[in-house]
Image (cartoon, rainbow, N blue to C red):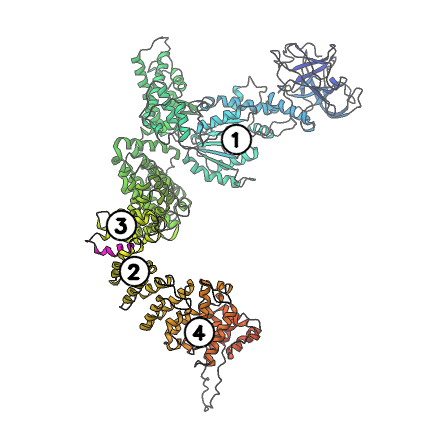
């Protein structure tokens, strides 16, 4: 049956059959190439009697070449009836290709394989056709133990033929291998030949066989209802090769890619939907093309299909329909090469790719070209199909398109089963103009070495660089050209090249009218004729742009294209130069950015704005203009600004802002129709988008200062009402604050080329729009960091702004300026001090005071500069801030302050500042002795710059003189006794004299005692003096006697009460006092002061009997119980109780006082409740008894005291007998009495 198969032929069209024999030449059977590695798949029956390692076998290829089978290259799988061996396929004779092996069926997408009753093909010389009669189980033959093989194919072959084992059984339509002949099988019906099935080997075979079949699916493409991965990859590769992207094929566009950080960068799209958003000319199509080429190449190619928006139709419900059309068109073009004439089904391609672990990726470039609007229903159906078919979609669109698609996609994801809008459902990439390293690479790539041009900007569109590179390659220097000039130059170059093509072909300018192309073989073309032809071409291109303005999506219909560029030379030249590209049912300019610019040159801007900004009242309801057509209107606005300047552009900007502002006001009746509301939203969108573009494109944005300030005010008001700027974008589209105001965020204002003062003035207003995101604050901080000291004076103007900030309740714009300047003081602290002193504002003085603490060296330098400045106001600043800085100055700063003070003192014309200079000089040990007398005289004269604190440092060296000055000043009215006593309390003990023993008061305390005796009304100030000394640990045992005399009871009650309150209040070191107590007396320090506090209180209470003193002392003790030692507190309560009992207060008042204190202080109530029984509890009356009863019932101590105080026992008065008559209620508590 096999015959001679040498050289292939009809019996073996692919040269895939391999004859297997022994090295002695005895034929054993056949096999076929199964992969590209030289693996031969055959039936186990062929090699069953041969050595297990394959020794002694050889094969003959279809080319007639013999190959020895190496030892160890034979693998048997008797349980499936299969075997395979590996042969080295070296040299030109290795021309045979592998045969595809059938997949397990039936397959829902591709249909079933051969079924009973269908014909099958067995190759050979000659090839024969058999009939499949189903499947059955069979037994293997041979010396080895018999095995049962299931699913053996039952074939009816023509009579008289001897079947050869190992020959493949093929599907006659798709030529896939269904099985391998095994005539030696036993147990089959008479007249039928068995064949080992291959469809189930993938699921039942060992890993080595599974790997072999996986390689076969890639290396041997199958089509039609037998479609496998190799067939799917072949289809997608050919579809990519035929698809157009940009001005040419996908491979050509991919070669133009420059590595960029915001691109796809080789990333495999893993989400159901990946979106690449970029403006026209940003290189989105190039990124898609590069990704498609990367996927289709490599050792493990991935299936990718390319669609343009123009390939979609208005009747398409989802993406599946245009995908099917693209594959059907490909099958029609490739019918001669394909193995099957059956149509290609997109579901089959998707299923095969997904089953192989290589999901199909569909690339959709420019969905804006679609003839109909891709609405929510389209996206929902598309996402549902993508999920069901396990297909991924990569879309490249404009930002304005994604604004509309995004919410619809999210709704579709939420509605899709199994997705719910998870994090891997949508992946968004945003392309920005080239900058940084990517821009440098692109400049080098296109050979742009000149120093001037658009590529010297911080960010450039990739298309502009490409145009500049092509112009340079053509001999045109693009240096200094603007974006519009680059587009014009590139178009002129294309028109010139098209004219050269037409001239070489001999086309006449008017030949399009007859629809013919006249050819003339002229070796040389006259330059004048080429120029005239180029002008004609340019005219037709501009006419095409005008016609494209009227089309809904921006394309040119087929009939219009053929009218302008007739089939033949014209169409061939225009398409060959890549100016236009065919897409869908029409033609499009190759570059969207060029199309926008070209159409913008012919746009009637006034009519366009009337159409776009109309309210729909005239002419009825109209259909909204597609948003992606905004590029042409933007180009027209740019051209207007370039030709007429900022003054000519300003009225149009006001028109746009007025339209946007009016859109925020309620319009029409409450029951406005949905189309009217949609038109109003569109009007807002167009107004905001065009305003953003026009302001950025203005040649002089500062000329629109009035408009910008109005915009900033409106944004600040709207954001404050919405809760912050970020909330504007989440607002209701029909609300009072248009969501389109969110377009005017920090990035927009940063992009305007404004003078610094104008920009900071706008930021001052815009900072009130900040919410929690603090975007404008971040913008101000970045601008301040970039500008440095130049921005300090401009930011200081914010101190006058008291407007509130939504993001900082209680804060103002002035607070924001304070924080910004403080946070960025390291930029130039000296310049900051100059800016602050120049503004002469209280907030600036406050910040200078802070800097005196944080940056004393800078303030010292500033004071020195101001003291030598000729302006008198600077001298005042030097005096004020020198005193504030002096406590923190060190090293060279002290010297600078000394020189500044001497300079101020030397100015006889400014005697008001001499006090400040003297205060500084007294602080300095170097100059103190010389200027102390002058400072004391200034203090005596009540100089505001010489307060008592300024003389405090002199107490260490000249205590007597300073104390005399203090005492003399205190004897006069308004002598600032509190400040003097504070200074004396903080002074070191015995300042200016020999330190007194610890039991004797120092001169300062004696001065305070004399002050108290002379002015008893200052008792609270003197008591606070003692309190301060006790807290610092500088008090002596004789201080109380020096202040109150002996005994203290001779002083008036208000004086004693002031001291009792101070002594009953523990200081912060009270716990340490208890821990550091010594048997031989307290050690110096705060702990010793707390011990003296208790001793002084005991001495005060020894002779105290007045309730006016004892009651406040107990109340203060109750309020500070938490800070008291419990044992000490109980002792103080007993002392006060004993003193009370000896006085005139009475037991009832004591009872009420004690319980009342417990009711108002929880810790004191707890102290009374936990009083040990053996520790002499304080005596009380009925209120304390009632409290103890309630405590016994488990009540909280404070609540028990409060309730006992409320339910005090009142005496009952017996009712007097009344005369008969109308009953009158007893006088007492009436209804409603609490």
Task: Give the mark toward the camera: 1 or 2.
Answer: 2
Q: Residues at badges 1 and 4 in contact (C-beta under 8 Å)? A: no
User: Relative to 1173, is 943 above or below?
Assistant: above
Give the residue at x 40% y 19%: 575
Task: Residue 149: name its quadrant.
Answer: top right
Q: Residues at badges 2 and 4 in contact (C-beta under 8 Å)? A: no
Q: Which residue is mark 1?
A: 268
Q: Secondary structure at mark 1?
A: loop
Residue at mark 2 to residue at mark 3: CA–CA distance: 19 Å
Q: In this rendering, would 947 be left or right of 393?
A: left
For marks 2 and 4 on the same chain, the one whose residue lies earlier in the sequence = 2
Q: In this rendering, would 94 be left or right of 938?
A: right
Q: Which residue is mark 3?
A: 900
The residue stretch that appears in magenta: 906-921
Q: Which residue is mark 4?
A: 1099
Q: Secondary structure at mark 3?
A: helix
Residue at mark 1 to residue at mark 2: CA–CA distance: 76 Å
User: Relative to 607, is 184 above or below?
Assistant: above
For marks 2 and 3 on the same chain, the one whose residue lies earlier in the sequence = 3
For marks 1 and 4 on the same chain, the one whose residue lies earlier in the sequence = 1
Task: Give the mark toward the camera: 1 or 4.
Answer: 4
User: Relative to 236, is 904 above or below?
Assistant: below
């Amino acid at each position: 049956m096999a015959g001679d198969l040498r050289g292939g032929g009809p019996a073996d069209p692919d040269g895939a059959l391999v004859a297997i024999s022994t090295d002695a030449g005895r034929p054993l059977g056949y096999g076929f190439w199964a992969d590209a590695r030289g693996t031969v798949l055959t039936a186990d029956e062929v090699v069953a009697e041969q050595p297990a390692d394959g020794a002694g076998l050889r094969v003959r290829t279809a080319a007639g070449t013999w190959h020895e089978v190496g030892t160890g290259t034979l693998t048997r799988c008797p349980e499936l009836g299969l075997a395979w061996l590996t042969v080295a396929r070296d040299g030109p004779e290795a021309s045979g290709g592998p045969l595809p092996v059938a997949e397990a069926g039936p397959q829902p997408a591709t249909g079933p394989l051969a079924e009973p009753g269908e014909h099958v093909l067995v190759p050979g010389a000659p090839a024969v056709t058999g009939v499949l009669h189903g499947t059955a189980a069979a037994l293997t033959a041979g010396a080895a133990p018999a095995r049962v093989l299931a699913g053996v194919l039952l074939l009816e072959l023509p009579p008289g033929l001897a079947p050869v084992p190992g020959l493949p059984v093929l599907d006659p339509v798709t030529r896939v291998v269904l099985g391998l002949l095994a005539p030696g099988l036993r147990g089959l019906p008479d007249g039928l030949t068995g064949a080992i099935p291959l469809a189930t080997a993938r699921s039942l075979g060992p890993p080595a066989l599974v790997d072999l079949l996986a390689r076969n699916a890639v290396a041997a493409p199958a089509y039609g209802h037998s479609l496998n991965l190799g067939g799917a990859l072949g289809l997608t590769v050919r579809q990519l090769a035929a698809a157009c992207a940009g001005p040419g094929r996908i491979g050509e566009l991919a070669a133009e890619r420059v590595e960029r950080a915001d691109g796809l960068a080789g990333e495999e799209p893993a989400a159901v939907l990946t979106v690449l958003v970029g403006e026209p000319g940003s290189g989105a199509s190039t990124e898609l093309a590069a990704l498609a080429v990367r996927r289709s190449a490599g050792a493990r190619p991935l299936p990718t299909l390319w669609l343009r928006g123009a390939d979609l139709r208005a009747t398409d419900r989802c993406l599946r329909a245009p995908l099917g059309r693209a594959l059907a068109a490909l099958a029609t073009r490739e019918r001669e090469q394909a193995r099957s004439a059956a149509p290609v089904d997109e579901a089959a391609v998707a299923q095969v790719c997904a089953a192989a672990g290589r999901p199909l990726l569909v690339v959709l470039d420019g969905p804006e070209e679609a003839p109909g609007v891709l609405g929510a229903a389209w996206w929902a159906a598309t996402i549902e199909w993508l999920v069901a078919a396990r297909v991924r979609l990569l879309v490249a669109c404009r930002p304005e398109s994604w604004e509309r698609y995004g919410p619809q996609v999210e709704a579709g994801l939420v509605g899709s089963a199994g997705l719910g809008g998870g994090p891997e459902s949508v992946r968004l990439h945003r392309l920005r103009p080239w900058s940084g390293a990517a821009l440098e690479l692109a400049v080098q790539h296109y050979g742009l070495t000149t120093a001037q041009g658009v590529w010297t900007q911080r960010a450039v569109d990739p298309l502009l660089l490409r145009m500049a590179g092509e112009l340079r390659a053509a001999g045109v220097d693009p240096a200094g050209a603007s974006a519009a000039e680059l587009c014009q130059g590139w178009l002129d170059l294309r028109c010139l090249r098209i004219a050269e093509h037409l001239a070489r072909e001999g086309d006449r300018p008017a030949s399009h009218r007859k629809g013919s192309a006249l050819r003339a073989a002229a070796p040389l073309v006259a330059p004048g004729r080429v120029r005239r032809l180029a002008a004609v071409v340019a005219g037709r291109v501009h006419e095409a742009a005008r016609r494209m303005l009227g089309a809904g999506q921006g394309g040119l219909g087929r009939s219009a294209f053929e009218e302008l560029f007739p089939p033949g030379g014209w169409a061939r030249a225009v398409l060959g130069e890549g100016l236009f590209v065919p897409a869908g049912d029409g033609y499009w300019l190759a570059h969207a950015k060029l199309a926008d610019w070209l159409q913008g040159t012919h746009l009637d801007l006034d009519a366009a704005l009337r159409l776009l900004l109309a309210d729909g009242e005239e002419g009825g309801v109209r259909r909204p203009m597609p948003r992606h057509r905004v590029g042409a209107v933007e180009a027209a606005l740019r051209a207007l600004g370039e030709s007429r300047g900022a003054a000519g552009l300003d009225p149009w900007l006001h028109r746009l802002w007025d339209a946007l502002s009016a859109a925020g006001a309620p319009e029409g009746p409450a029951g406005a129709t949905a189309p009217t509301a949609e038109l109003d939203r569109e009007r807002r969108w167009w107004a905001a988008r065009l305003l953003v573009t026009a302001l950025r494109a203005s040649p002089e944005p500062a000329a629109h200062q009035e408009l910008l300030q109005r915009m900033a005010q409106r944004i600040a008001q709207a954001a404050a009402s919405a809760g912050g700027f970020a909330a504007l974008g989440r607002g209701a589209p029909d609300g009072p604050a248009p969501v389109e105001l969110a377009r005017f965020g920090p990035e927009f204002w940063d992009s305007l080329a404004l003078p610094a003062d104008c920009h900071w003035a706008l930021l001052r207003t815009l900072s009130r729009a900040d919410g929690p995101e603090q975007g404008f604050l971040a913008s101000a901080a970045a601008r301040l960091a970039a500008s440095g000291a130049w921005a300090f004076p401009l930011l200081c103007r914010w101190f006058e702004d008291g407007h509130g900030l939504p993001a900082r309740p209680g804060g103002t714009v002035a607070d924001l300026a304070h924080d910004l300047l403080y946070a960025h003081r390291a930029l130039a602290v000296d310049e900051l001090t100059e800016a602050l002193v120049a503004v002469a504002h209280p907030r600036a003085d406050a910040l200078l005071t802070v800097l005196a603490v944080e940056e004393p060296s800078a303030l010292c330098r500033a004071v020195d500069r101001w003291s030598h400045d000729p302006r008198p106001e600077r001298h005042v600043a030097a005096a004020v801030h020198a005193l504030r800085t002096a406590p923190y100055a060190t090293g060279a700063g002290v010297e600078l302050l000394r020189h500044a003070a001497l300079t101020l003192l030397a100015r006889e014309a400014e005697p008001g500042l001499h006090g400040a200079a003297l205060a500084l000089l007294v602080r300095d040990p170097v100059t103190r002795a010389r200027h102390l007398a002058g400072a004391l005289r200034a203090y005596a004269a009540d100089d505001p710059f010489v307060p008592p604190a300024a003389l405090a440092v002199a107490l260490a060296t000249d205590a007597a003189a300073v104390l005399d000055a203090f005492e003399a000043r205190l004897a006069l009215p308004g002598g600032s006794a509190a400040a003097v006593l504070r200074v004396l309390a903080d002074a070191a003990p015995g300042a200016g004299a020999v330190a007194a023993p610890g039991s004797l008061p120092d001169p300062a305390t004696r001065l305070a005692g004399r002050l108290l005796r002379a002015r008893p009304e200052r008792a609270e100030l003197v008591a606070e003096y003692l309190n301060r000394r006790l807290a610092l640990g500088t008090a002596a045992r004789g201080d109380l006697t020096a202040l109150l005399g002996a005994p203290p009871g001779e002083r008036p009650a208000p004086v004693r009460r002031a001291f009792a309150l101070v002594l009953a209040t523990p200081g912060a070191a009270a716990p340490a006092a208890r821990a550091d107590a010594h048997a031989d007396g307290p050690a110096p320090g705060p702990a010793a002061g707390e011990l003296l506090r208790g001793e002084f209180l005991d001495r005060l209470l020894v002779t105290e009997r007045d309730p006016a003193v004892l009651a406040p002392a107990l109340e203060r003790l109750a309020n500070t119980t938490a800070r008291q030692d419990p044992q000490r507190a109980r002792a103080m309560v007993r002392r006060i109780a004993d003193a009370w009992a000896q006085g005139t207060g009475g037991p009832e008042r004591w009872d009420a006082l004690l319980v009342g204190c417990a009711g108002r202080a929880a810790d004191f109530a707890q102290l009374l409740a936990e009083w040990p029984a053996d520790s002499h509890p304080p005596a009380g009356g009925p209120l304390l008894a009632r409290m103890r009863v309630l405590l016994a019932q488990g009540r909280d101590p404070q609540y028990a005291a409060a309730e006992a105080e409320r339910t005090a026992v009142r005496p009952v008065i017996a009712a007097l007998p009344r005369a008969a008559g109308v009953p009158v209620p007893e006088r007492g508590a009436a209804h409603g009495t609490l």
